Amino acid sequence: RAHGVREYLRKPFELHTIRGIVRRLIAQYPRRPHVPTSVAKGHVRLDTKLRTLWIDDVRVATLSPTRADLLRVLLAASEPVKREKLLQEVWQGKGSVSALEKTIQRLREDLGSDQANRLQTTNEGYELLG
């Protein structure tokens, strides 16, 4: 991506002129806030940028975008997450309970048979145990 010319500077120039240009450019392009690239709970970690699932620092799976979003919500929660909240956060309210259940099933498969019990079903929703 070409940036092009932001400002023309004639030679010879003064130091205060360059300082002014730099200040204007910095004000024009503020820094973006740092977004964490991973979410963790106990021994389970999700790299949100690469959508990779890690358990005990061993890569277990690379998740689909939907499964990664679902896992991100479950990892960020400190208590069980209601089905309605998961449908709203992951599918923006347009998903169905059957789609949620199927995604949970596939997420358990991604966790592996020995780790699938980390994803608990509660009366109102789901909880991931770290």
Image (cartoon, grey):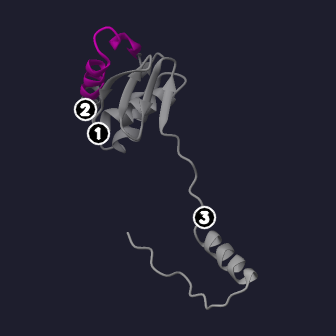
| Contact between labelled residues 2 and 1, with CB atoms less than 8 Å apart | yes
- Please name the residue shown 37% across and 27% down the image: 53
Q: Is 20 placed above or below 90 here?
A: below
Can you identify the residue that label 2 sits on?
A: 99
| Contact between labelled residues 3 and 2, with CB atoms less than 8 Å apart | no
Q: Is residue 117 left or right of residue 24?
A: left
How far is the residue under mark 1 from the one under mark 3?
37 Å
Q: Which mark is residue 95?
A: 1
Secondary structure, mark 1, is: loop
- Please name the residue shown 32% across and 8% down the image: 114
Q: Quadrant of residue 17?
A: bottom right
What percent of the width, then of the height, locates residue 119?
A: 38, 17
Q: Is residue 62 left or right of residue 48?
A: left
Camera-nearest residue between 76 and 34: 34
Q: Quadrant of residue 101?
A: top left
Q: Which mark is residue 30?
A: 3
- The local crowd at label 1, few if under 14, some if 14 to 19, many if 20 or more residues have their Cα within 10 Å, is some
What percent of the width, then of the height, locates residue 121?
A: 38, 16
Q: Is 49 placed above or below 61 here?
A: below
Q: Which stretch did the figure color magenta?
A: 102-120
Secondary structure, mark 3, is: loop
- The local crowd at label 3, few if under 14, some if 14 to 19, many if 20 or more residues have their Cα within 10 Å, is few
Q: Amino acid at mark 1?
A: Gly
- The local crowd at label 2, few if under 14, some if 14 to 19, many if 20 or more residues have their Cα within 10 Å, is few
Q: Amino acid at mark 3?
A: Pro
